[in-house]
Amino acid sequence: MTSQRLIPLAALETLMKSAGIERVSESAKVALKKALEERARKIITRAAVFSQHAGRKTLKGEDIELAAKE
Amino acid sequence: MTSQRLIPLAALETLMKSAGIERVSESAKVALKKALEERARKIITRAAVFSQHAGRKTLKGEDIELAAKE
C-alpha cells in the first residue's frame, strides 16, 4: 500500500518547502512517503490495541496520541 | 501548518481501513495527521543537515532514509 491514494507526494513537497528546503529530489519525496506510511502503520496498530484495552470499538484521538508517544 | 493542503485526512482514513480498523473517529484522523506532520518535520530537519554534510544542495532519498532511522 504505497499508492498515491495514500499520502500524496505533493503534500510532502509542501512540507519540505515549508521547512525551507529549496531543492528536493523525487527520491526524497518517495523515501519520506515510505517512512511516514510505515510510522502511520505502527501508530495505528498500537492505537487499535489501546482502544480495545479501553473497551471501545471506535478508534479515538486519545488512542492515537498515546500510540504516537514512544 | 496543519491545513488540509498537507497530509489529507482521507489518506489517513484509507491507511486506517487498510489496517483493519472499522470505526474511526474524526479526532483519531486529526491526531494521526498531527503526529505524522510532526514526525515529517523532524525527519526533514535532520535530512537537511545530512545533505549539507554531504556537500549537496539537493535533498535526496538517502538523506531521508538516514534521518528516518532513530
Image (cartoon, coloured by chain):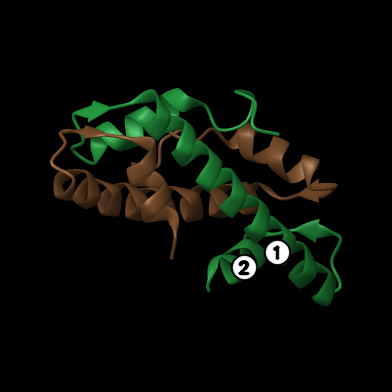
Chain colours: A green, B brown
Image coords of residue A52 (percent x, y): 84, 70
Say yes or no: labels 2 and 1 on the same chain.
Answer: yes
Q: Residue at x 71, y 50 (%)?
A: B25
Amino acid type assigned to the residue bearing label 1 in the image: Ala
State which tag comes first along the sequence, 2 or 1: 1
Query: Does B25 sit above or below residue A61?
Result: above
Residue B25 numbered mark, or none: none
Q: Which mark, residue A47?
A: 1
Quadrant (top left, top right, bottom left, bottom right) of the N terminus of chain B: top left
Against A48, residue B10 (above or below) is: above
* Residue receiving disc 2: A67
Q: Nearer the viewer, residue B15 or A59?
A: B15
Q: Quadrant of residue A25?
A: top left
In three-dimensional space, the C-alpha distance between marks 2 and 1, rounded to whole angstroms, equals 5 Å
Residue sitting at 82 percent across and 50 percent down? B21
Q: Chain of mark 1?
A: A
* Residue B8 x %, y %: 54, 32
Which is more toward the observer, A64 or A13?
Answer: A13
Read off the chain for label 2: A
Near mark 2 (Cα within 10 A), the count class, few <14, some 14-19 or many ≥20, is many
Q: Quadrant of the C terminus of chain B?
A: bottom left
Q: Amino acid at mark 2?
A: Ala
Q: Residue at x 77, y 62 (%)?
A: A48
Residue A21 location, x and y as percent?
21, 35
Name the residue rendered at 38%, 45% in the picture: B64
Q: Are marks 2 and 1 in contact (CB under 8 Å)?
A: yes
Image side of residue A52 versus residue A4, left or right: right
Choose between A7 and B30: the one closer to the eye: A7
